[in-house]
Amino acid sequence: MVKSPQTHSSDFPASKAASWLNCGLFSKVNKDAVFEETEVARYGTQTHALGCAEIKKRMNLKDYDEDDVSIEELIKTLDLYDENMKSLAETYAQTVISVFESQKKVATEEPIIVLEQLLEMDFSEGAKGTLDCGIYSDANGGTVTIIDLKTGRSPVMAFDRETNTPNAQLSLYALYFVKAYKDIYPIKNVRLLIVQPVINNTNDYEMNVDDLFKFETDVLLPAVTRAKADNPEANPGKQCKYCAFACKCKRRMEATLGVIDNSKEASELSDDEILSLLPKLDEIGDYIASVKTYATKKAQEGYKWPGFKLVRSKITRKISNEEQVAKILKENGIEPYGSASLLGITELTRKLGKAKFNELIGPFITIQEGSLVLVSNSDIREEVTIEHKEAE
C-alpha cells in the first residue's frame, strides 16, 4: 500500500474535472484563483485522513513512504474531529474493506489496494491528482475499482443521468490508475464507486475498459485542446458555481439574462458592464424567486412539470425514546452511549446491521420531513406523490 502527498494540478485539477471538461475557459481563468479553504473543506480533508488510517489499521497495511501514525495520535491533530467524523470514516473504511474482500473471493490471487495514491497524468504538463482508493483484482479478466469518499451533502453520482456520462473525476482517476497497471496486469472491467455516508448515498457504475479509453480520446483530449486555445470559449452551465470568474463571464451573463452577443470581443465583463447590471440584480432575483414559487406551488397542486419532480428538501431521522433504545442496545451487548450522548443512527446501523436496526430500533425512529422543493429528475432523492384534488 502506497500513500502519496495531496498534490493536484493547478491547471486541470481532477476534483474539478466536470468543470474544465465542459468549459474551455474554466482552466485559464481559475489557474491562479485563490479559493478560501472553508471549514467544510477542512472537515472533508480530515475525514479522508481518518478513513485512510481506519483502513490501514483494519487491513494491517504498511505505509512505505512515511512512519505510520496510530489513529489515536492522528485524532489529536484533527481540530474538527467529532463522533460524526468517526462514523463517516468508519463507514468508508468498511465499504472499502467489503469491496476488497468480495474481489478476493473471486480472484485467483490477492487483490492490490492503494490508498491516497498520487496519479501522474500525461495529458498536460504537471497534471496530477490523488486517488482516495484503487483496487485491482484478476477477477473476470481483470477488474479495477475506483472508490471515492464524499463528505458534502449535495448528492454525487458515479454516473450522471443528466449528461448521460460517468463521473468525470472518477473517470480521470480510473484512466490513469489503469494506465499505471495495464502493462503489468490484464484489465477488462472498471467500476466507479461513490461513498457518501453523510446522506447514505453509495452508488456505482461499471464500464468496459475500452469505454475508459474512449473517454480519453473523445472527451478528455479535445477538452484539453479547447482549454489551451489562445482564446478559449466559455460554456455556461452548472459548473459556473465553482468558477472564480463566474460573476465576470460575459457568456454566463448572456445565458442567464437571455442576451445574445455575437461579437468576438473578450469574454470578460468590464467593471462598467457589471455596474450596469447592479441595479437590476434585486429585480432579477425577485423574478427568479417568484417563478420558482409559482412552479413549486403548481407542482404541489398536482401539475407535472416535464423533467422535474417534487422531493423533500431534507429528511431528518430522530430517536424518539432514547431510554428505551439504550435498554435494547444493552440487552444486545452494545454500549449505547458515546461521550455523553446516545450513538448516532448511522453508527447504530453499522453496529447492529441494517435488518436488526430496523427490527429493534425502527419503532423508535421518527422522520422529520423538509419542505417541498422542485428539482430536476436527475436528483437522486425520492419523488413525493401529490394527491391531486379536483376543484369543487
Image: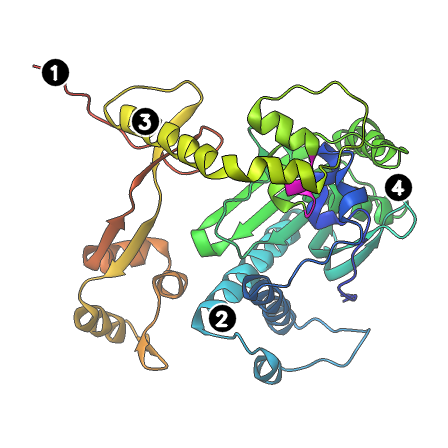
Q: Name the element at disc 4.
A: loop
**Horizontal and vertical percent position of residue 107:** 69, 48
Taking 148 as reference, is 28 left or right?
right
- Between label 4 and label 1, give the one nearer the viewer: 1
**Horizontal and vertical percent position of residue 86:** 49, 70
Amino acid at the residue labelled 1 = Ala
Amino acid at the residue labelled 3 = Tyr
Q: Name the element at disc 2.
A: helix
Which residue corresponds to mark 2?
A: 86
- First in residue order: circle 4 vs circle 3: 4
The span picked out in magenta is: 244-249
Front residue of this view, candidates 51 and 378: 378
- Between label 1 and label 2, give the one nearer the viewer: 1
Taking 363 as reference, is 48 left or right?
right
Residue appearing at x 14%, y 16% in the figure? 390
- Between label 4 and label 2, give the one nearer the viewer: 4
- First in residue order: circle 1 vs circle 2: 2
- Between label 4 and label 3, give the one nearer the viewer: 3
- Residue 169 placement: quadrant: top right
Q: Name the element at disc 1.
A: loop
Locate the N terminus and report the quarter of the image it occupies.
bottom right
Which residue corresponds to mark 3?
A: 294
**Horizontal and vertical percent position of residue 72:** 57, 84
Front residue of this view, candidates 332 and 368: 368
